[in-house]
Image: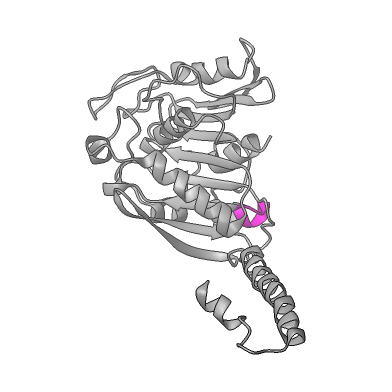
Amino acid sequence: MRGLRAAFRPARGAEPQQRHRRRVTWPLSIALLLCLAGCAAAVVAPPAPPGTRTVTLHTPDGDRSAIVHRAASAAPGAPLVVVLHGARGTARDMRAKLGWDALADRERLVVAYPDGLDHTWNAGRCCGSARDRKVDDVGFLDELVATLRRDDGVGAVYAVGFSNGAMMSYAWACARPGALAGIGPVAGALTVDCPAPAPLTVVAVHGTRDERVPFEGGRGPSGVDFRSFDASLAPFRTAAACPATGVQAVAAPARVDDRSCDGHAVVSDVVDGFTHVWPGAGPAAGTTTGPLDATGFLWAHLQG
């Protein structure tokens, strides 16, 4: 500030008219500086270009990364789908096998595939080293969303996941009521206390012969005692004021229960005889909306 004042201080002996002109230029110059500063602050960075990139975040648990795919047709406010891998899985695996990139290109979405530390997520009672190290995965996912809001201008956020990633989607919804528009857990269970979640859309897929996360609940090979499929959905049905029964549809081997609730929906897709799998994973994933294509089924019901 002293430098600025010196620059506009009149020299000794200057004529009164000159001093007057200099006093006028001082506020004008300050106004110019303020204008320039304001204009610089108002500049908004352009959205990230379409295509696929890796985003790296610095967190208290170390550097964390996510693969992000932005459809060329994704407009400002485009939905964001966060796809969470299972234990021992990776972001790369989920991207390669589940068809979300192609679905995003058709539906004008942004999709993010984050990596859990040591290939696991801290979803409460499950699983592995992320749980044991008390990794703040909710904080990481919050920061990822904040980054994509800034860089991609995303709107509503949905979390889908498989197994431990499905558990993480439940845990995220419980820890941040109102932050998510919907979740899509596949072959997972609720592994945190969640007495009063915010109303949101839940679309859950599970096989009746799941050997790792038992459909009827109980201890899995990981040593965790899991809630049953229905018990996992119960807090969300209550929060959204769902009816006791929904619209039933059977397309063997799948049984769908679709409950239209208070502004949301809770939909279950139970596949008889299926084990711990993502139904429809592979080259054709996401190309239909049927109950044996979990990718397409999830998005068709999450978006309403």
Of residue 123 and residue 259, the one placed in the foreground of this image is: 123
Residue pictured at 53% horizontal, 59% vertical: 69
Please state the horizontal and vertical placement of residue 179, each as a whole percent of the image: 55, 36
Q: Position of residue 285 (x, y in %)?
A: 54, 48
Which residue is at 56% across, 77% downward? 4
Along the line of sight, the residue nearer the viewer: 286 or 251: 286
Q: Which residue is found at the position 36% from the left and 25% from the top?
A: 191
Residue in view at x 62 percent, y 36 percent: 302
Q: Is residue 294 a member of the stretch shown in magenta?
A: no
The front one of 272 and 90 is: 90
Using the image, determine if residue 279 lies above or below residue 47.
above
Q: Where in the figure is residue 107, as x and y percent of width and height?
A: 67, 51
Residue at the farthest front position: 13
Q: Confirm whether residue 99 shows in the render.
A: no
Q: Which residues are magenta?
A: 104-109
Locate residue 33: give its quadrant.
bottom right
The quadrant holding residue 238 is top right
Residue situated in front as seen by the camera: 186 or 55: 55
On the image, the x and y values in percent for residue 145 come to: 51, 48
Q: Main secondary structure of the magenta part?
A: helix
Q: Is residue 38 left or right of residue 281?
A: right
Q: Vertically, is 207 above or below 54?
A: above
User: Above or below — where is 109 with respect to 237?
Assistant: below
